[in-house]
Image (cartoon, rainbow, N blue to C red):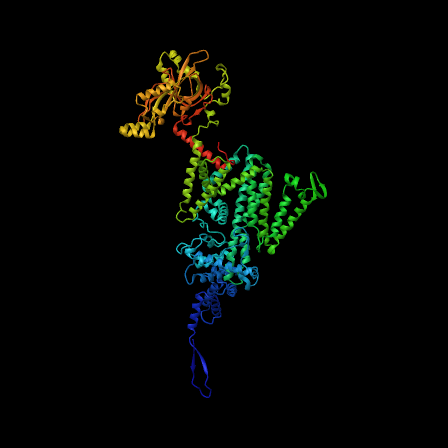
């Protein structure tokens, strides 16, 4: 400290004022305190004083302490301190075994790394406000603000490249691009206004606010990020931030079926990045079991007998897999490069002229060149093995679509431009390659209609070189000669740094173009459409399923309305579809129902699908070939059969899996009793035939009702009083006079029966006869054999569904029937109990068959249609499962046909 003192005159000298300096210990303590706080200038000044031995008597201790402060200053980007530390290290001044490694580490840092460390500390001090940590959201917000500031200056014409002087350093970091996720080195961030940063009005498309307990960034983390940045590596802090894409959970608040409808751009952006990340990280995510399965497949390919075919095919698909994986890795790297340039802008804003942004960015690109090596190796292997492959083993259409997609995405991602407009050299080079490599000779449209684009006509002389080599100068050759010119121009950019920033990525795009053209030469139009629809169905499954879940109830409603006019049906479908979409959107927007709209939509879709497919599942399939798979196809002969006499009717033989009547009669008929002389043996043997399907034909001899079942009448008469039973019976039933009303007044028998009802006072009584369920018995005469003209009868047990067919039969009609043999028949069928008449096959001259299908071969009523009950062919459970499978197949055919057809 210094104070003013007034000294007394001494001798003859005049009086004057002097500085009285007190003890310098306080000043040195202040310097030490400031140096320990991290001031690099004070640290450097203090180290110089220690090296000059002005403050300490112990020279060795002073030198060691000076080296300590030089290390601290050098790590903060002080270049003079780094130079002085290098001099001390070379002379061995203050270097000990304890600090030698730390000195080497400090000296190994580049000026850019030291400047980045200093910028990171200043950034942390600015954001933390004296705290010990910051949040990723704070850092992300600051990076967005800096980018917005630089973008505004760039629009005003103040932007410069990263290699200019430090007065314009803040404008260097970022370049304009055409898209937020696809341009190389370009950024298009959207800065959120301050008003929307409030919690109550925060956009749902922003990342959720991290908590200090879970996501914290300390000063050491930020310094480590600066070290990684200087070395050309992506800072690890970037993994918890979303700078150039929406947050992965930004659409979680929107129902999954409505995300494409409400936020199409965000939806496709998230879909793109998720697919790229999944494929790029696929080798790391493959479980051990899958790797073992792949090894087994490789072993099978190597050990197979047909090695010359299997090995090239396996190698070809392996090359395709490597190219797809490496391309996705490149796309992910290009997107990471956008974030890396944002980090450049951040450190440039808080650093000095020593920040080597361009060097760090070039290092980042060079550090991620390994996928390019894998790609080109696989590309070369692909074309080496392609001539060895059989054409039928390659899905050319699907490969064409995949290659075309990667051509499009790689061209957009690798297009490097410092302006708003795309890189014209890149586009022109791509166009020249398309014109030069397009197979005009295989395109009928070009060769016949586009003669002005015909590039096959030679315009210069042709020369034959050697055997089978023709050198021809034409328009295509001129285009090929232009390709190297454009490639060299791309490589010369940025002092030949364009070789790995632009040229090599551009060659990847051209390689995919060549693969697309090669595969397209063997592709078909239907195959291309199939592959396109299949890929769209896989990528857009949820939106398409959401659309289908809305359309299926619409179809049910339109079907229920029953419009027959095509125009009215189409108009009603469009109107109901719009109403369904609007109603679904309303439910998705409403905060109360948006959590349940997806489940509700799926349930309605399943219900509507069941309603839509139920008639198909339960129909008799009269017009289909299903009936013909159970019994011989006789319907197409019916018109001929009815016109022929009985002796001229020749039916096709039954399928071999069915038991014929002759064989059954020989084993279980009366003839078998006579041979065995014991009916028991025949019964025991034939009892095992129960449930065996048979397909026979014969003549009708008798039709009768075997049993009646009426559950409503049974419960009403049993559990209700008689007066209440009469009221309910008349309410739901019909009067006997109405049931037995004569259609023709001149019918004497009918009139006589009406008179009987009147005289007996029965005409006013009521009956629930319309609720009756009948079981019919149809007796059929069967021929025992060609020589044996004796007739044997079988009894067909027909359920209620055969009622209309049975009523139209008369004696003498010839029918063809299908059913199963049974050991018992139902005598009566009350609602509560079943009464059976038990017997065994082979013990009665009349075999009983449970009827499942029947049709007329020669009937008096020619319009009597065939009847089939599919549920009777097998057990009810099997029938329901079969119906369910048929319904599922039908529904899948609606969704996937004609891509995939289930039969």
Q: Residue furthest bottom?
A: 12
Q: Residue furthest front?
A: 745
Of the pair 513 and 230, the residue shown nearer to us: 513
839 w.r.t. 541: above or below? above
Position of the N terminus, as image quadrant, is: bottom left
Q: Position of residue 542 (x, y in %)?
A: 46, 43
Asked whether the viewer can see residue 299, the reply is no
Q: Residue furthest left?
A: 721
> Horizontal placement of 172 versus 606: left or right?
right
Residue drawn at 47 percent across, 36 percent down: 563
> Horizontal placement of 227 versus 769: left or right?
right
Of the pair 324 and 588, the residue shown nearer to us: 588
| Label tally | 0
Asked whether the viewer can see residue 779, the reply is yes
Q: Residue furthest right?
A: 461
Q: Position of residue 322 (x, y in %)?
A: 53, 43
Of the pair 485 and 292, the residue shown nearer to us: 485
145 w.r.t. 543: above or below? below
Residue drawn at 43 percent across, 71 percent down: 28
Q: Position of residue 748 (x, y in %)?
A: 38, 18
Q: Position of residue 556 (x, y in %)?
A: 44, 37
- Displayed quadrant of residue 685: top left
652 w.r.t. 331: above or below? above
518 w.r.t. 174: above or below? above
- Displayed quadrant of residue 6: bottom left
């Amino acid at each position: 400290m210094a104070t003013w003192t007034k000294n007394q005159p001494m001798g003859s000298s005049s009086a004057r004022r002097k500085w009285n300096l007190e003890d310098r210990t306080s000043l040195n303590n202040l310097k030490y305190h400031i140096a320990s706080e991290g001031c690099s200038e004070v640290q450097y000044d203090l180290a110089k004083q220690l090296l000059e031995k002005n403050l300490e008597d112990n020279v060795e201790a002073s030198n060691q302490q000076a080296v300590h402060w030089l290390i601290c200053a050098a790590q903060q980007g002080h270049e003079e301190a780094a130079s002085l530390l290098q001099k001390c290290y070379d002379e061995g001044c203050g270097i000990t075994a304890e600090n030698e490694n730390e000195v080497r580490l400090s000296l190994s840092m580049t000026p850019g790394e030291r400047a980045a460390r200093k910028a990171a500390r200043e950034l942390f001090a600015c954001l933390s406000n004296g705290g010990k940590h910051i949040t990723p959201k704070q850092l992300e917000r600051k990076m967005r603000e800096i980018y917005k500031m630089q973008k505004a200056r760039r629009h005003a014409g103040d932007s410069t490249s990263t290699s200019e002087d430090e007065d314009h350093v803040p404008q260097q970091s970022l370049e304009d691009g055409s898209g937020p996720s696809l341009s190389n080195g370009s950024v298009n961030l959207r800065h959120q206004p301050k008003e929307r940063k409030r919690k109550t009005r925060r956009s749902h498309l922003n990342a959720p606010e991290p908590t200090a307990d879970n996501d914290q960034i300390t000063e050491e983390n930020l310094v480590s990020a600066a070290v990684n940045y200087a070395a050309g590596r992506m800072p690890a802090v970037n993994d918890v931030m979303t700078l150039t894409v929406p947050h992965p959970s930004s659409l979680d608040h929107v129902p999954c079926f409505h995300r494409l409808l409400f936020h199409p751009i965000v939806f496709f952006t998230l879909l793109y990045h998720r697919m790229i990340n999944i494929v790029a990280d696929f080798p790391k995510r493959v479980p051990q079991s899958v790797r073992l399965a792949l090894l087994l497949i490789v072993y099978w390919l190597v050990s197979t007998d047909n090695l010359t075919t299997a090995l090239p095919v396996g190698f070809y698909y392996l090359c395709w897999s490597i190219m797809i994986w490496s391309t996705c890795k490149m796309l992910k790297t290009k997107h990471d490069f956008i974030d890396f340039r944002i980090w450049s802008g951040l450190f440039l804003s808080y650093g000095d002229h020593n920040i080597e942004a361009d060097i760090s960015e070039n290092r980042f690109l060079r550090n991620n060149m390994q996928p390019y090596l894998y790609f080109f190796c696989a590309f070369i292997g692909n074309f080496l093995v392609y001539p060895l492959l059989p054409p039928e083993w390659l899905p050319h259409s699907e490969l064409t679509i995949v290659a075309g997609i990667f051509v499009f995405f790689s061209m957009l991602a690798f297009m490097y431009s410092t302006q708003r407009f795309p890189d014209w050299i890149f586009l022109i080079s791509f166009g020249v390659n398309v014109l030069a490599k397009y197979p005009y000779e295989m395109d009928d449209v070009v060769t016949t209609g586009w003669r002005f684009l015909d590039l096959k006509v030679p315009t210069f002389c042709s020369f034959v070189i050697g055997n089978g080599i023709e050198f021809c100068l034409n328009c295509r050759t001129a285009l090929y000669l232009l390709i190297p010119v454009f490639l060299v121009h791309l490589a010369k950019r940025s002092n030949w740094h364009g070789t790995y920033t632009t040229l090599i990525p551009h060659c990847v795009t051209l390689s995919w173009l060549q693969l697309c053209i090669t595969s397209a030469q063997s592709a078909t139009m239907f195959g291309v459409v199939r592959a396109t629809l299949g890929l769209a169905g896989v990528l857009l499954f949820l939106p398409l399923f959401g659309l289908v879940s809305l359309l299926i109830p619409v179809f049910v409603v339109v079907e229920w309305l029953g419009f027959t006019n095509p125009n009215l049906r189409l108009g009603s479908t469009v109107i109901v579809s719009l109403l369904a979409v609007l109603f679904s959107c309303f439910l998705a927007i409403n905060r109360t129902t948006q959590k349940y709209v997806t489940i509700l939509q799926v349930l309605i879709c399943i219900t509507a699908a069941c309603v839509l497919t139920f008639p198909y599942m339960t129909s008799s399939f009269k017009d289909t070939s299903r009936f013909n798979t159970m019994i011989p196809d006789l319907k197409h002969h019916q018109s001929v059969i009815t016109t022929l006499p009985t002796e001229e009717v020749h039916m096709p033989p039954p399928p071999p899996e069915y038991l014929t009547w002759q064989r059954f009669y020989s084993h279980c008929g009366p003839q078998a009793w006579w041979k065995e002389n014991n009916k028991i043996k025949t019964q025991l043997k034939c009892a095992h035939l129960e449930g065996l399907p048979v397909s026979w034909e014969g003549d009708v001899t008798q039709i009768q009702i075997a049993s009646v079942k009426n559950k409503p009448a049974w419960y009403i008469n049993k559990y209700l009083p008689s007066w209440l039973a009469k009221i309910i019976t008349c309410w739901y039933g019909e009067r006997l006079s109405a049931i037995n009303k004569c259609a023709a007044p001149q019918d004497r028998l009918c009139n006589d029966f009406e008179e009987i009802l009147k005289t007996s006072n029965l005409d006013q009584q009521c009956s629930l006869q319309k609720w009756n369920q009948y079981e019919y018995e149809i007796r059929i005469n069967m021929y025992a054999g060609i020589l044996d003209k004796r007739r044997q009868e079988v009894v067909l047990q027909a359920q209620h569904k055969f009622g209309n067919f049975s009523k139209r039969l008369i004696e003498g009609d010839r029918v063809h029937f299908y059913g199963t043999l049974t050991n018992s028949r139902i005598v009566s069928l009350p609602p509560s109990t079943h009464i059976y008449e038990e017997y065994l096959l082979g013990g009665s001259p009349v075999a009983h068959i449970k009827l499942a299908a029947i049709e007329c071969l020669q009937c008096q009523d020619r319009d009597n249609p065939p009847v089939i009950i599919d549920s009777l062919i097998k057990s009810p459970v099997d029938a329901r499962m079969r119906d369910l499978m048929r319904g599922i197949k039908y529904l899948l055919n609606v969704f996937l046909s004609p891509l995939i057809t289930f039969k």
